[in-house]
Image: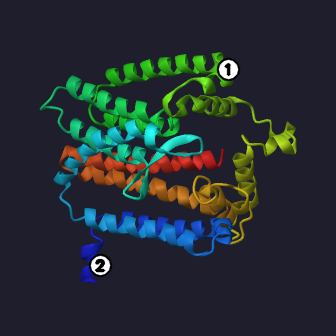
Amino acid sequence: MELARKLFKGDRVIWIIFMLLCFVSAVEVFSATSTLAYKNANHWEPIARHASFLIAGALTVLVLHNVPYRLFALGILLLPVSILMLVVTPFIGVSANDAHRWLYILGFQVQPSEFAKLGCVIYVAFLLSRIGKFTERQVYRWILIGVGVTCVLILPENFSTAFMLFAICYMLMFVGRISWRRLVKLAGVLTLAMGFFVAIWFAIPDKEWEDLPVVGDAMDRVPTWKSRLITMFAPDNADTLDTDELFNKENYQVSHAKIAIARGGLSPQFPGHGVQRDFLPQAYSDFIYAIIIEEMGLLGGVAVLLLYLWLLVRVGMIARKCDKLFPKFLVLGCGLILVVQALANMAVAVN
């Protein structure tokens, strides 16, 4: 019992949420990887791989629990390292789903944007905690430079990650004593810039974007962004589409995700009874939430959603108890990364 207290110190509620999410993910990934397991000589390999990630994550948590929070400030070095990785990724990165987002380092495939997320949050938290030693104007400019460069490098290959990362850093500035006038001006400038670029996207034909000689074929993503904007703002005309239109390349995943959600109903069918896991290409990753709803029903889907919201509430409570500014902002930033990304994934899965 004493050993358990030493190992699992910290907020017990967050430990409970962590374990519940690990349990749900292990069960649902095992169910959703049926197609992968069928194609594999070792049908345990997909779930074994996922379990290894969970174990590695749990061990990392246990180690970090014993590191003094002051040392986390050294994580600011992640930002220049991640920027360097993002610069070289278009040249030597691994192409997947028409984008260069991965690097091979020492035999491991890593995604530089994940390092950039953590690096940016530590960087912003550190600078916000230094308001007083430096002027608010200086801190604001340094944050814009560091976060802006990082997001610009991420944006060509992964618009959603760049947008989400900047939004999280913006929220941190909002709670970190940056004046609302600066934040309103920043939001206005970015909105105008976004409107300008969207107008250019629609003014130039897709074929011309694809023919532009840009490093890493980054401009090939513009037609994808355009189609997503059209889908987002166009009225739902699913009733008027024929089968070929519903299940073409653009609508395939969304249509099968909707079928999964419709099959789920209110009460659970329980894992192993899902059908759409055999049709959704990313059933065990990007669209796992649709499979959760199909197998665990709307009640199960809401339960997972509430776990993440509960986590955010606990993060806020911990931040309020922090006497020092750096750990306060760091806790909020890390909590926002986890919850905002999870909510965005759920939103995509349910269209």
Can you see residue 271?
Answer: no
Q: Mark 1 points at which residue?
A: 205
Query: Label 1 neighbourhood size at 10 Å, few (<14), some (14-19), many (20+)?
Result: few
Q: Do the residues labelled 1 and 2 touch (CB within 8 Å)?
A: no
State the CA–CA distance, disc 1 to disc 2: 61 Å
**N-terminal of the two: label 1 or label 2?**
2
Q: What element carries label 2?
A: helix
Q: Mark 2 points at which residue?
A: 4
Q: Give the percent coordinates (x, y) of residue 13.
A: 38, 65
Relative to 239, 91 lies left or right: left
Q: Give the percent coordinates (x, y) of residue 15.
A: 37, 67
Compared with residue 281, is residue 113 higher up or lower down, i.e. above or below? above
Q: Give the percent coordinates (x, y) of residue 302.
A: 59, 57
Q: What's the residue type where badge 1 is placed?
A: Pro
Q: What's the residue type where badge 2 is placed?
A: Ala
Can you see residue 294?
Answer: yes
Query: Label 2 neighbourhood size at 10 Å, few (<14), some (14-19), many (20+)?
Result: few
Relative to 338, 44 lies left or right: right
The residue lying at 59 percent from left, 45 percent from top is 97
Give the quarter of the image for residue 65: bottom left
The residue lying at 44 percent from left, 57 percent from top is 310
Q: Give the percent coordinates (x, y) of residue 122.
A: 28, 44
Number of numbered labels in the structure image: 2
> Which image quarter is the C terminus in?
top right
Q: Is mark 1 on a helix, strand or loop?
A: loop
